[in-house]
Image (spheres, rainbow, N blue to C red):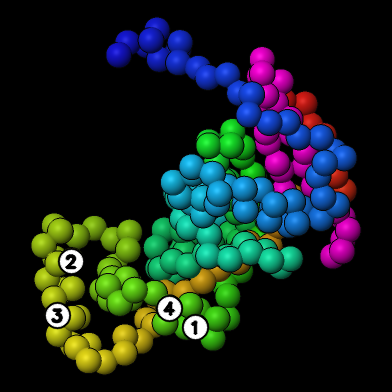
Amino acid sequence: MNQQDIQNIRSEYAASSLSEKDTAADPVKQFEKWFNEALKSEQHEPTAMTLATATHDGRPSARIVLMKGFDKEGFSFYTNYLSRKGKELSKNPLGALLFFWDSLERQVRIEGTIEKLDRATSEKYFMTRPRASQLGAVISPQSQEIAGREVLEEKMKQAEAQYEDKEVPKPSHWGGYILKPRLIEFWQGRRSRLHDRIVYKKIDNKTWKKVRLAP
């Protein structure tokens, strides 16, 4: 495919609309509404979200992670604390999330501060994971160079033998984070690229200001 062909790839958006009066006063309530609709849609992975972090000097990186919960406090996910994102968050706690639900022609963009979840919460979630995922968290030196896949496969065999008939403990290098939002934007695709954008900005601990942005 040549560059001209790529330039001509486009879609028209006409699935729905978004107005100020139709959105909740609380952005978390609005997110819950949209998330429930995403669950009922043809979206393959509705919990998938892009997590953007940056180094202390502003070098950005992004990856897909899975949301594992949300409430008025924020949006949670789990990972290896020694991964690139974990190291970046230890130096720069500012981050952003992006959900893209193409089945509904919607995006939700969230900005805020990211903090570690407490150990008890991380351990409680870890115990609910499939055993293979628990073992994977134990043996994987996430984001580090390895000689080949066979290194991981051999470590997995060793871990399976070590923890045979035993509970797999949560490794100290693995756990949860929560993004505490200061800004949440809801984007609904519309015709002619005149998309609807409603953004909530946190004024204080209890108050959000809701405004419309130009597309």
**Could you say which disc has been placed on residue 128 in the image?**
4
* Crowding near the residue tagged with mark 1, few <14, some 14–19, many ≥20 C-alpha atoms within 10 Å: few
Q: In front: mark 1 or mark 4? A: 4
Distance from disc 4 to disc 3, alpha carbons, whole Å, reads 22 Å
* Crowding near the residue tagged with mark 4, few <14, some 14–19, many ≥20 C-alpha atoms within 10 Å: few
186 vs 52, nearest the viewer: 186
Q: Which residues are magenta?
A: 184-208
Q: Position of residue 44 (x, y in %)?
A: 44, 46
Q: Residue shown at 51%/71% (left/top)?
A: 176
Residue 167 location, quadrant: bottom left
Along the horizontal axis of the image, is 181 left or right of 43?
right
Q: In front: mark 4 or mark 2? A: 4
Q: Is residue 78 above or below residue 187?
A: below
Q: Which residue is mark 1?
A: 124
Q: Is residue 62 above or below residue 144?
A: above
Q: Residue shown at 55%/81% (left/top)?
A: 121
**Could you say which disc has been placed on residue 152 in the image?**
2
Name the kind of residue labelled 2 in the image.
Leu
Q: Which residue is mark 3?
A: 158
Along the horizontal axis of the image, is 33 left or right of 127?
right
The answer to whether mark 1 and mark 2 are in CB contact below 8 A is no
The quarter of the picture where the N terminus appears is top left
Residue 23: in sight, yes or no? yes
**Could you say which disc has been placed on residue 104 in the image?**
none
Pointer 1 or 2: first along the chain: 1
Q: In front: mark 1 or mark 2? A: 1
Q: Secondary structure at mark 4?
A: loop
